[in-house]
Image (cartoon, grey):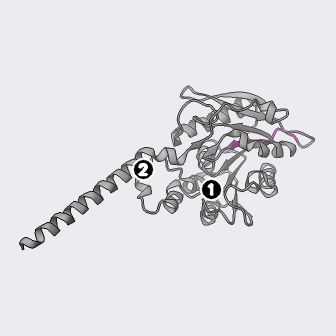
């Protein structure tokens, strides 16, 4: 009927507008997703000795030609026996924020390497899953090749996104132990929780399949998580522990970014215990 034509045109126009908005939103999410995933703090960072007494500045060399800044802190005291921890940061900040953890571990006899990914802490390059994989390999190469840490005395520690970085490394270069703090099962699972209106799994360029990696790894696993984590659901961390048949350490009442999950006693004790088991 003729009187339906204006209504039909309005409906078609509304549908066209909705489709256009959806295309713009999805296109923007795809194009800018790494700006949402990676939240680096720039540099320069202070010299190691200004933040970590006894620490030294080192440079890591990646296979794709980048030079990355890092700090190495030897273990102190009578319990220092060559054990070392490679620390893979989460998605935000830089290595300076992890200095309290390094000090706590060093006081318990463990050497510690803190490093920044590409694009973090004044380093060149832009972060991506493949890029961070190259970065953590450069960190391991420094500890094993330059410092001379035996692989049977090397612990990988990954915080949140860093859990995905070291879990993948462990499938190729198994450590003495793998300690993951607040790990997700994969990046899409945690992304879908925060962006339920987007087809996150279809859009993601970087996936970090932590659960799959720990299922393949032979390294003894410890998972530390906060029971009040609102960023990575605690159930995902528990699922990672089950997949890797690992030890589970719950920090009651702790949220994702609470200081107790940076250098609190339960976390530090879990890393030290993993290094001696």
What's the residue at 67%, 65% (across, down)? 228
Mark 2 is surrounded, within 10 Å at the Cα level, by few (under 14), some (14 to 19) or many (20 or more) other residues, namely some
Query: Any mark on residue 223, and which?
Result: none
Q: Look at the numbered disc 2 and give the secondary structure of its residue.
A: helix
Q: 221 and 129: which one is in front?
A: 129
Q: Where does label 2 land, which residue?
A: 29
Q: Which residues are magenta?
A: 80-87
Q: Nearer the viewer, mark 1 or mark 2?
A: 2
Relative to 108, does residue 59 appear above or below in the rendering?
Answer: above
Percent position of residue 146, x then y:
73, 28
- Assign the N terminus to one quadrant of the image: bottom left
Q: 48 and 134: which one is in front?
A: 48
Q: 210 and 57: which one is in front?
A: 57
Hey, which residue is sitting farthest right in the picture? Answer: 78
- 234 is within the stretch colored magenta: no
Mark 1 is surrounded, within 10 Å at the Cα level, by few (under 14), some (14 to 19) or many (20 or more) other residues, namely many
**Distance of label 1 from label 2 (alpha carbons):** 23 Å
């Amino acid at each position: 009927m003729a009187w339906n034509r204006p209504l039909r045109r309005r409906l078609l126009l509304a549908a066209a507008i909705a489709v256009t908005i959806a295309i713009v939103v999805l296109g923007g999410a795809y194009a800018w997703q790494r700006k949402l995933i990676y939240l680096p703090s720039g540099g320069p960072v202070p010299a190691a000795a200004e933040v970590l007494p006894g620490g030294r500045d080192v440079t890591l060399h990646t296979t794709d030609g980048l030079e990355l800044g890092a700090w190495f802190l030897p273990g102190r005291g009578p319990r220092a026996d060559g054990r070392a921890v490679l620390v893979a940061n989460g998605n935000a900040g830089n290595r300076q924020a992890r200095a309290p953890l390094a000090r706590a571990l060093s006081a318990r006899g463990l050497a510690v390497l803190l490093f920044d990914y590409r694009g973090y802490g004044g380093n060149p390059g832009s972060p991506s899953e493949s890029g961070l994989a190259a970065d953590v390999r450069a960190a391991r190469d420094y500890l094993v090749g330059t410092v001379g840490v035996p692989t049977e005395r090397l612990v990988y520690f990954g915080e949140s996104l860093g859990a995905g970085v070291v879990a993948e490394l462990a499938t190729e270069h198994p450590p003495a132990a793998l300690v993951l703090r607040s790990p997700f099962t994969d990046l899409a699972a945690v992304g879908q929780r925060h962006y339920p209106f987007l087809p996150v799994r279809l859009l993601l360029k970087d996936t970090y399949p932590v659960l799959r990696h720990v299922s393949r790894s032979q390294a003894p696993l410890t998972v530390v998580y906060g029971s009040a984590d609102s960023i990575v659901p605690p159930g995902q961390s528990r699922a990672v522990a089950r997949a890797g048949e690992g030890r589970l350490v719950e920090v009651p009442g702790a949220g994702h970014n609470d200081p107790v999950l940076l250098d609190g006693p339960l976390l530090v004790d879990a890393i030290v215990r993993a290094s001696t088991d």
